[in-house]
Image (tube, grey):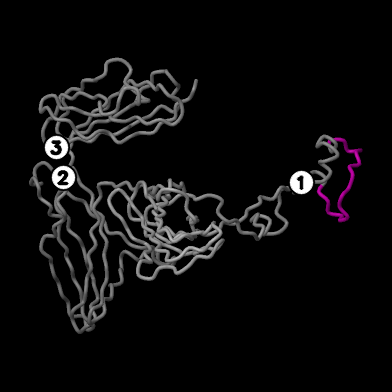
Amino acid sequence: MSQGGQGGGGSHSLAFRVMRLCRPSFNVEPPLRLDPADLFAGEDLFDDPAANPPSFSSSDDSDSNYRNRFLLRHFSDAMGLSGLLVLPQSFGAIYLGETFCSYISINNSSNFEVRDVIIKAEIQTERLRILLLDTSKSPVETIRAGGRYDFIVEHDVKELGPHTLVCTALYNDGDGERKYLPQFFKFIVANPLSVRTKETTFLEACIENHTKSNLFMDQVDFEPAQYYSASILKGDGHHSEKDSPTRETFKPPILIRSGGGIYNYLYQLKTSSDGLPQTKVEGSNVLGKLQITWRTNLGEPGRLQTQQILGTTATKKEIELQVVEVPSIINLQNPFMLKLNLTNQTDRELGPFEVSLSQNVSYGERAVMINGLQSMVLSEVQALGSTNFHLNLIATKPGIQRITGITVFDTREMKSYEPLPDLEIFVDMD
């Protein structure tokens, strides 16, 4: 944690010290297994049957050919734990969603005591200021010479980026002068997770029994709309039931108990291209409907069909640009071909297209650029069709680099589509 300058004009008797509180780690010492004879003789000594290597063991089960030298004699040998804990040696990383906990000490380094100390601690971000401690209503009466006042603050981290822990003290110095001490401690909050989504819809049906009788569900089937296909997702059953040939033929009914019993069904819906252009109305969000049949305790049947179930309307991309193949070896300053696929996801012809690199990144900052003409022309793509093409690129910097800003522009409709997500590659020196 870095410390900023302190204000107030002149020297101060007080100073803040900040330590992050976090759990220790295990002290791991990987075991090194060897035979003491290795220190005095090489391995070729044992190639001679007449050789008599020195013995450092009093047991009779010595392994002269080292056949068992990597075998663990005890299960604890694999752990490498010394039984010690190691305290953090640095401030470490703070991630979104964690709780920042800090031990703060305000020290009096002067030869006289200070009085009526008002202490404040707050977290500042680009958008918020969160007060963590304020002793204005009950100031610390005195801090003796060489003494200190300690406290702990906590903050649930809910924002990415730079954070500043601001510690301030307002106090009476030894000569009665009222002084103000601010100190700043900065740290960065990083993102702990990378989340990627796929275009698959999950529908959970929660069936609740409002009757006074137990219901035995014979059938709870989801009939998807014509442009969807559906499959039910089930948890793994008992091992004795998994491969039973009669399990699907004689399916036991699901019991939902009377007076509020609940059972959940989970269905996975995937978009089907069959019938999509003819049946799907623009903006329609109909998913399908449920067919439910059941029986009561005495076998009396029941049947119910729900109304059409509506999902959240999602705007479907007109085109989708995907990476098909990346060369396994990419050398610095050598051209390479990136294979891409462009799919038309509409029911009409699109194009022609121009493929280029976005101009949002300056020329000097870009590590991978197009080799040759800076735009590539693609012909029209039929409705629901796709085309593969190669983009000739060249890397100008070694190491892990990003291919950024590959953009598709429709020259007929004069519109640009979202660029391809950044692609990481490794560039070899030669």
Callout 1 secondary element: loop
Q: Is residue 93 above or below residue 105?
A: above
Task: Choose between 245 and 131: the one closer to the eye.
Answer: 131
Looking at the rendered structure, the kind of residue marked 1 is: Leu
How many numbered discs? 3
Residue 237 colored in magenta in the image: no
Q: What residue is rendered at 46% in x and 46% in y? A: 2
Name the residue tied to disc 2: 315
Q: Is residue 137 above or below residue 15?
A: below
Indicate which disc, 3 or 1, sits on the residue closer to the N terminus: 1
Looking at the magenta stretch, what is its main secondary structure?
loop
Q: Residues within 10 Å of mark 2 (few under 14, many from 20)?
A: few
Relative image position of residue 425 (x, y in whole percent): 41, 31
Task: Choose between 55 and 372: the one closer to the eye.
Answer: 372
Task: Choose between 25 and 274: the one closer to the eye.
Answer: 25
**111 displayed left or right of 119:** right
> Mark 3 to mark 2: distance in Å?
12 Å
> Mark 3 to mark 1: distance in Å?
67 Å
> Mark 1 to mark 2: distance in Å?
65 Å
Looking at the rendered structure, the kind of residue marked 2 is: Thr
Question: What stretch of residues is rendered in magenta?
Answer: 47-63
* Labelled disc at residue 34: 1
**416 displayed left or right of 34:** left
Relative image position of residue 330 (x, y in whole percent): 43, 24
Select label 3 or label 2 by which is in front: 2
